[in-house]
Image (cartoon, grey):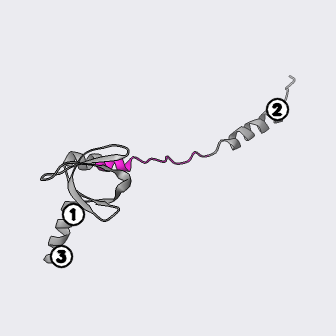
Amino acid sequence: MNRKLIRPNLAEIKEKMRSESVRKKSHPPYDTHAENYYHLKQMNKKTPMAVVFEDGEIVEGCIEWYDKKCLKLNRDNAPNLLIYKNSIKYLYKLNDTKEKNKKMKK
């Protein structure tokens, strides 16, 4: 009974190690879709929102639809607005501010 020792080829092992080291972790995605989720949630609930522009002007209404660069604000007693997102400083819910004011007065 003659047994033969099987040895792996070192060149193959080195090549595998090189190919594994070349593969790096991928970067996290640039877009988390959190903004899309937030807009959809406010649209479905028809939440009254306030939009604050870069110059400080505040406009109130409900978000009717949104795009990658725009937001359509539906207002009750005024014409609807199509707003570019790059002109928006921030958004907030009108219900939240009313509740906070009520709590502060009590």
Q: Nearer the viewer, residue 49 or 44?
A: 49
Residue at the image position 17 percent from the left and 71 percent from the top: 101
Separation of disc 3 and disc 1 at Cα?
12 Å
Residue occupied by mark 1: 96
Look at discs 2 and 1 and give the one toward the viewer: 1
Q: Secondary structure at mark 3?
A: helix
Q: Earlier in the sequence, mark 3 or mark 1?
A: 1
Residue occupied by mark 2: 9
Which label was assigned to residue 46?
A: none
- In the image, is residue 82 part of the stretch drawn in magenta? no
Residue type beneath disc 3: Met
Residue type beneath disc 1: Asp
Question: Hey, which quadrant is residue 54 in on the image?
Answer: bottom left
Q: Which residues are magenta?
A: 25-39
Separation of disc 2 and disc 3 at Cα?
77 Å
Q: Earlier in the sequence, mark 2 or mark 1?
A: 2
Q: Position of residue 47 (x, y in %)?
A: 20, 53
Q: Secondary structure at mark 2?
A: loop
Residue at the image position 52 percent from the left and 48 percent from the top: 28
Q: Secondary structure at mark 1?
A: helix
Residue occupied by mark 3: 104
Residue type beneath disc 2: Asn
Q: Position of residue 80 (x, y in %)?
A: 20, 48
Separation of disc 2 and disc 1 at Cα?
68 Å
- Tell me: 80 left or right of 83: left
Per the picture, the main secondary structure of the magenta-coloured stretch is loop
